Amino acid sequence: MNEFELFTMIYYALDAYYEDHIDDYYINCILSDMCPFTFKNIGSADPAMYIEYLEFLDKRKITLDNSLDIAKDYLKTIDFADVTPALKDMDKDEWIEYCKEYLSEPHKGEKLEDDK
């Protein structure tokens, strides 16, 4: 799993969380800024969001096994809304299954040079 794939998985988790919090303006703003599908290139709708995410990663090696912990830690860095509940109760095995399903299909960012 590479950094963009994890970013996308975090986006999907927040999007699912938003379905139950549709009136939360701040989550909507985060999703708008974070959207990894707005442009053809690798990044987010607001380029600063993806840049800050990469700075957070600081060259951390991402694996399926540690990706949920990294995702949870990343959500803690989003300071204008508390979105940590989006992954708080996520089971590691369930997360890994979601990731495997996502990674098994053609997707944006799959050809980044990184371990999968």
Image: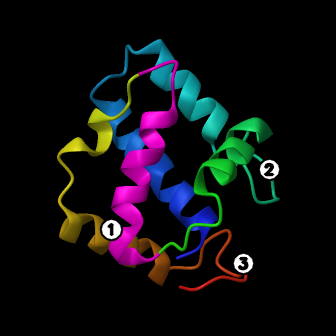
Examine the residues drawn in magenta and state their main secondary structure: helix
Q: Residue at x 81, y 58 (%)?
A: 40
Q: Residue at x 59, y 73 (%)?
A: 2
- Picture layout, residue 45 above or below residue 101: above
* Nearest-to-viewer mark from 2 and 3: 3
Left of 46 or right of it: where is 36? left
Label 3's element?
Answer: loop
Determine which residue is flagged by label 3.
Answer: 112
Looking at marks 2 and 1 on the same chain, the residue that comes earlier in the sequence is marked by 2
Cα–Cα span, label 2 and label 1: 24 Å
Q: Is residue 51 visible to the viewer in this orientation of the structure?
A: yes
- Taking depth in this image into account, of 47 and 67 the one nearest to the observer is 67
Disc 2 residue type (three-letter): Phe
Disc 1 residue type (three-letter): Tyr
Q: Residue at x 54, y 74 (%)?
A: 61
- Coloration mode: rainbow
Q: Which residues are magenta?
A: 63-81
Determine which residue is flagged by label 1.
Answer: 98
Label 2's element?
Answer: loop
- Picture layout, residue 22 above or below residue 111: above
Label 1's element?
Answer: helix
Q: Residues within 10 Å of mark 2 (few under 14, many from 20)?
A: few
